[in-house]
Image: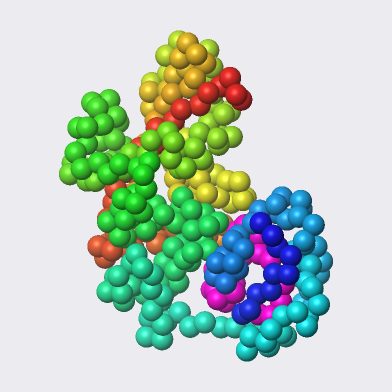
């Protein structure tokens, strides 16, 4: 990506937001920067810090507000045509989130559904499904949209299959899903091993550590299942935390060609939590938000199955 001469026409500055920086922002900050973040996403995307470190077209410095970040190496200001936005328009802008003032609507979620949400729910809904979050946390964003829009993201994914009949997954997977809380008649999604979601889970350090610690048992096929908890809000862990958090690995084994096989299963049913400490309250926000939408009938539970295939010869 060429970042040279990038100018955000909303703010008039050359500030570039990275994925890690956005993950460290609060909900209020993300909403305040909605327009400028969407503008950046549509023009240069949301890069990783490592990508900018390798680019000769950016520099790391401190802005007029004392915030350190990445900035494009701008050409002479005269090269930019007037856009109607003041160059010094860097002050925070407040965007109303009240349902009476503004409906945060997307192509995937109906205005009727949005109107049934509280102002806080509207804000979280927008935060999760907007184009910027889709770029930073695609798995979490798309799996949420599937719950509120009848699996629309999965239906458009060539490496995902909608499961109308759970029997098609085989008796072992079916029984594990029932034991995991899936109810008869619920729809599900099967992601094949070539899907981005399955690849994200297959490359996770949590799974790699499990394979390394249990390789002999996996070769002997003596492990039937294993419970996983994906923790952490750092950039490399947040995707799994917000999209999966808890999952069960079933039927894992390593074949004679040193290839790992297995399936992760997950159920999107949200159980209300009653946090007590500030940290617990923050961690419970996504879960209790989903529970609230379930109670209103705005989020439909579904299960996910991720096929995993890892050639350990390349590890």
Residue 127 locus on image (x, y percent): 48, 66
Residue 27 locus on image (x, y percent): 54, 68
Q: On screen, 88 above or below 29?
A: below
Q: Residue at x 53, y 63 (%)?
A: 132
Is residue 169 within the magenta segment? no
Work out which quarter of the rendered image holds the C terminus and state it: top right
Where residue 28 sits, quadrant-wise, is bottom right
Taking the image as shown, residue 202 lies to the left or right of residue 303, namely right
Where residue 74 sits, quadrant-wise, is bottom right
Q: Residue at x 50, y 33 (%)?
A: 202
Q: Residue at x 30, y 70 (%)?
A: 110
Q: On screen, 196 above or below 300?
A: above
Work out which quarter of the rendered image holds the N terminus and state it: bottom right
> Is residue 249 at all visible to an observer of this figure?
no
Range of magenta residues: 11-36
Is residue 33 within the magenta segment? yes
Residue 258 locus on image (x, y percent): 52, 16
> Is residue 136 at all visible to an observer of this figure?
yes
Residue 103 locus on image (x, y percent): 38, 79
């Amino acid at each position: 990506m060429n970042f040279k001469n990038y100018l955000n026409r909303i703010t008039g500055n050359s500030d570039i937001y990275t994925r890690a920086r956005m993950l460290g922002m609060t909900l209020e900050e993300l909403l305040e920067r909605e327009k400028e973040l969407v503008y950046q996403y549509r023009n240069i995307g949301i890069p990783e810090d490592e990508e900018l470190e390798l680019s000769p077209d950016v520099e790391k410095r401190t802005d007029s507000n004392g915030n350190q970040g990445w900035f494009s190496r701008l050409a002479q200001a005269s090269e930019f045509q007037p856009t109607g936005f003041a160059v010094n328009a860097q002050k925070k802008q407040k965007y109303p989130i009240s349902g009476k003032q503004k409906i945060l609507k997307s192509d995937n979620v109906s205005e009727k559904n949005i109107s049934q949400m509280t102002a806080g729910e509207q804000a979280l809904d927008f935060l999760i499904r907007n184009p910027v979050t889709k770029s930073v946390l695609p798995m979490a964003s798309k799996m949420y949209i599937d719950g509120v829009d009848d699996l629309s993201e999965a239906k458009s994914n060539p490496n995902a299959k909608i499961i109308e009949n759970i029997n098609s997954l085989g008796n072992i997977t079916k029984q594990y899903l029932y034991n995991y809380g899936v109810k008869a008649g619920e729809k599900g999604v099967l992601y094949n091993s070539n899907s981005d979601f399955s690849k994200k889970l297959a490359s996770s350090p949590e799974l790699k550590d499990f394979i390394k610690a249990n390789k002999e048992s996996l070769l002997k096929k003596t492990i039937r299942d294993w419970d996983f908890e994906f923790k952490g809000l750092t950039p490399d862990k947040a995707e799994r935390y917000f999209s999966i958090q808890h999952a069960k690995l079933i039927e894992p084994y390593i074949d004679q060609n040193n290839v790992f096989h297995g399936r992760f299963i997950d159920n999107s049913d949200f159980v209300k939590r009653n946090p007590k400490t500030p940290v617990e309250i923050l961690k419970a926000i996504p879960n209790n938000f989903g529970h609230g939408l379930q109670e209103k009938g705005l989020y439909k539970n579904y299960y996910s199955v991720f096929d995993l295939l890892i050639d350990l010869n390349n590890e």
